[in-house]
Image (tube, helix red, strand yellow):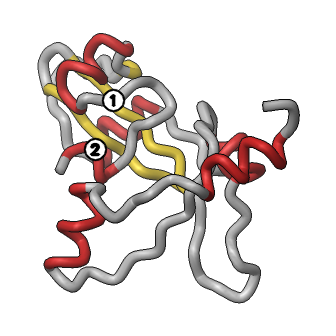
Amino acid sequence: MDNMTDVTAAVDQIDFSTNPILLKLSSTSIPHHTYPHTLSMTADELITNVPLPADSNETHTKNLFFKDKKHGLFLVCACTDAEVNTKELGKMLKLEGKVNLRLADEKVLMEKLGVKKGCVGPLAIM
């Protein structure tokens, strides 16, 4: 594929009718919109690749999967322009004792969520 138009055309051809997550959302009457797009490794890429309707209250998010040896795993969804301070996050989560939140590596992402870096999101835990 030579340019972004070719990539977008290819993505638009994807059949989502058998996607288990979308089927589950539909079967439970949870309203949803699907925005097919190319892989976006960062929130900035997502904003560029998936423009949202200007007249909607929808927003993009960055999804961060943290690991702490003592406290476990945490999926945090934040606005794309939010600064995430892990020390403050630990306090907000009411974690006690030594807190050492770090972004989980790709091995943990695959093991726990079954996704690669760039594909983390709330639906990955379903």
Above or below — where is 75 with respect to 79? above
Name the image quarter holding residue 39: top right
- Using the image, tell me which numbered label, if any, was put on residue 115: 1
Above or below — where is 101 with respect to 33? above
Q: For mark 1, give the secondary structure.
A: loop
- The picture places residue 73, in percent across and down from the top left corner, at 20, 30
- Contact between marks 2 and 1 (CB within 8 A): the answer is yes
Q: Residue at x 29, y 64 (%)?
A: 22
Q: Residue at x 38, y 46 (%)?
A: 121
Instruction: Give the residue type that dot 1 points to.
Output: Val
Name the image quarter holding residue 87: top left
Q: Which residue is mark 2?
A: 124
Is residue 84 rendered to the left or right of residue 113? right
Quadrant where the N terminus is found in the figure: top right
Is residue 86 rendered to the left or right of residue 13? left
Q: Residue at x 68, y 57 (%)?
A: 50
Q: For mark 2, give the secondary structure.
A: helix
Is residue 61 rendered to the left or right of residue 47? left
- The picture places residue 91, in percent across and down from the top left corner, at 30, 41
Query: Looking at the image, which is closer to me, 56 or 20?
Result: 20
Separation of residues labelled 2 and 1 (CA atoms): 7 Å
Instruction: Give the residue type that dot 2 points to.
Output: Ala
Query: Looking at the image, which is closer to me, 81 or 106?
Result: 106
Is residue 77 rendered to the left or right of residue 8? left
